[in-house]
Image (cartoon, rainbow, N blue to C red):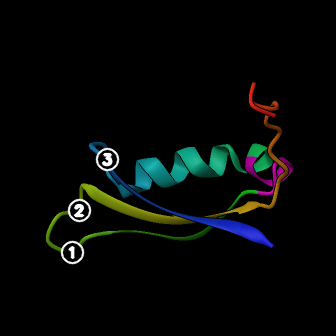
């Protein structure tokens, strides 16, 4: 099982610059099991980037609450 995350950010240097940055980090993303499933900008507003990313399932550690 994995976690899917949808994000929306404003990019000011264009999609190609953003894409190059992501490709430069490809090794780190792969090392952590993170994958981009979708990335694209809006036709009417190319500064609005939408992404869908998949993160591997991970266990979260939470300390016991004082009530436990």
Gap between marks 2 and 3 measured at Cα: 8 Å
Q: Is residue 31 left or right of residue 28?
A: right
Q: Residue at x 58, y 49 (%)?
A: 22
Q: Which residues are magenta?
A: 29-33
Q: Determine contact: label 2, label 3, CB under 8 Å.
A: no
Q: Residue at x 79, y 61 (%)?
A: 56
Nearest the camera: 2 or 9?
A: 2
Helix, strand or loop status at disc 1 = loop
Which residue occupies the extreme left position in the image?
A: 44
Q: Which mark is residue 43?
A: 1
Which residue occupies the extreme top position in the image?
A: 66
Q: Is residue 44 left or right of residue 1?
A: left
Q: Which residue is labeled 3 in the image? A: 11
Q: Which residue is labeled 2 in the image? A: 46
In the rendered image, residue 3, in percent from the top left (x then y), is placed at 68, 65
In the rendered image, residue 2, in percent from the top left (x then y), is placed at 75, 68
Helix, strand or loop status at disc 2 = loop
Q: Residue at x 25, y 70 (%)?
A: 42
In the rendered image, residue 21, in percent from the top left (x then y), is placed at 55, 44
Q: Is residue 28 magenta?
A: no
Please tell me in which quadrant of the rendered image residue 45 appears. Answer: bottom left
Taking 9 as reference, is 46 above or below it? below
Gap between marks 1 and 2 measured at Cα: 6 Å
Other residues around mark 3 within 10 Å, as few (<14) / some (14–19) / many (≥20): some
Please tell me in which quadrant of the rendered image residue 4 appears. Answer: bottom right
Q: Determine contact: label 1, label 2, CB under 8 Å.
A: yes
């Amino acid at each position: 099982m994995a976690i899917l995350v949808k994000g929306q950010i404003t990019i000011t240097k264009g999609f190609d610059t953003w894409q190059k940055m992501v490709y430069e980090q490809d090794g780190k993303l792969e090392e952590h099991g993170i994958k981009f499933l979708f990335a694209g900008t809006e036709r009417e507003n190319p500064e609005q980037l939408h992404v869908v990313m998949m993160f591997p399932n991970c266990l979260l550690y939470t300390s016991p609450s004082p009530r436990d």
